[in-house]
Image: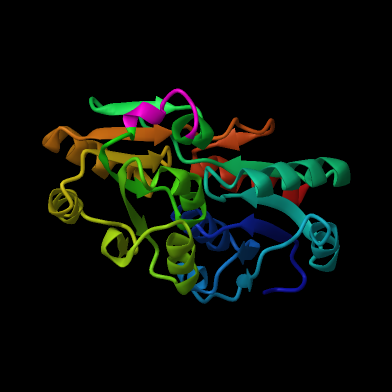
Amino acid sequence: MVDSLPIVWLIGGTVDSRAVAAGLIAQGINCLVTVTTSEARHLYPIHPYLIVHVGALTPQEIPKFLKRHSIAVIVDASHPFAAQITTTVTAIAGEQNIPYIRFERPPLALGKNTLEVPDIQSLTTGKYQPYLMGKRVLLTVGARWLSYFSPLQDQAVLFARILPYPQALDQAIAAGFTSDRIIALRPPIAEPLEKALWQQWQIQGVVTKASGAQGGELVKQKVAEALGVNLIRIARPQTIPGQITDDLSQINQFCQRHLSS
């Protein structure tokens, strides 16, 4: 990190953020990336213009963090479903008059076998619940959301795909999943493996998030159509007001403009 240059705070942890970081450091811009897990550190190269901070920041810690690191611009490249951090940082950036821009991967059009529901509650306790009842359903929504499905364990045959972390396994077990209904895999997952897994478990329905092609959604759409399986997509949270783009060049231009002003 070059001390004489202003710093961009990049909210990372996604494949998108890796591309954003590469673009910034290629322009000689100091970039401080924050991620919540040590595993995510390895997304980024070792470079004199880049440092990685591991650990979640609370809303109370963020203003101190901004001041301590002399943050001049904020680039939010967090996951489309990381609504809490986006909401918090957008508000703080406005209060402190720090330029903020969000990179959000483009959404996919609905596939032939895809049904979109507005939120997790409408699926697990609302009008879309019948799509799960009595079915063999694979959940690819992340371990933290598995608890929503706990009351349905006796009404459907539920399987969970999680990240290969001890915490994720603990969350799956706590939600009522037995070892024969859990698989731990790190994405990306190739189409042949995805297809084989659904066939092995005789899956009739799959629940996923609207996480875009980078989140494996396109592969799931293709497999769902090939096997005649219903794909249920949970819609993204409502977009937070502010400057949003899916163009990496606009991120670079935004940072250059505000760092030179």
**Quick check: is 126 in the magenta stretch?**
yes
The stretch in magenta equals 125-131
**Residue 8 in which image quadrant:** bottom right
Residue 44 visible in the displayed image? no
Q: Residue at x 62, y 56 (%)?
A: 11
Q: Residue at x 29, y 34 (%)?
A: 231
The image shows residue 235 at horizontal and vertical percentages of 47, 32
**Residue 21 in which image quadrant:** bottom right
Q: Is residue 187 left or right of residue 61?
A: left
Q: Nearer the viewer, residue 126 or 49?
A: 126
38 versus 252 height, above or below:
below
Q: Nearer the viewer, residue 224 or 249?
A: 224
**Quick check: is 172 in the magenta stretch?**
no
Query: How many labels were placed on the picture?
Result: 0
The image shows residue 135 at horizontal and vertical percentages of 26, 38
Residue projecting furthest to the front: 154
